[in-house]
Amino acid sequence: MSESVNQYDITEVVRAVKSARTKFDYVLVDFPFGNRHNSLASLINLTVYIKTPLDLLLARQILRDYSTSKLTDILDWLKTYIRIARPIFLANEQFVSSSADLILDGSSSLPSKVDFVLKTLQRDKF
């Protein structure tokens, strides 16, 4: 999977992270591959993976993207999800989480997740 990740040109992301690092103590980057892209890996001190159950992700996506759609559109997406998307999500979850420094429960509250990350940053002096 690492070959697939590194095929993406993330020059602009890398440039933005480098620039932000000169201005801020902490830079948060929301990136689907964590620290697994070769161009970004050396710029990341701490990788946090938010592990959210796939059923919860699917429900959130349907509510967000299909709330005004026809039932046939929703059913078509669900068929695609089962056949194609879910295996990809599972593989990506394993790939990214295997190199994460912290794995958070995606079903926990946002304040709980933020508190845990802040305590880790303070404790480990990143």
Image (cartoon, grey):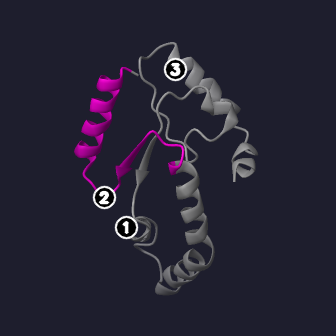
Rate crowding at label 3 as few (under 14), some (14 to 19) or many (20 or more) other CA atoms within 10 Å: some
Tell me whether the residue at label 3 lies in contact with that at label 1, contact meaning CB atoms closer than 8 angstroms.
Answer: no
Q: Which residue is mark 1?
A: 56
Give the alpha-carbon distance from disc 2 to disc 1, as whole Å.
Answer: 8 Å
Foreground mark, 3 or 2, reads: 2
- Three-letter amino acid code of the residue under disc 1: Leu
- Three-letter amino acid code of the residue under disc 2: Ser
Foreground mark, 3 or 1, reads: 1
Tell me whether the residue at label 2 lies in contact with that at label 1, contact meaning CB atoms closer than 8 angstroms.
Answer: yes
Under tag 1, what secondary structure?
Answer: helix
95 and 9: which one is in front?
95
Earlier sequence position, callout 3 versus callout 2: 3
Q: Which residue is mark 2?
A: 107
36 and 67: which one is in front?
36
**Up-down relation of residue 84 to residue 120 (above or below):** below
**Up-down relation of residue 96 to residue 9 (above or below):** below
Query: x%, y% of residue 62?
Result: 43, 71
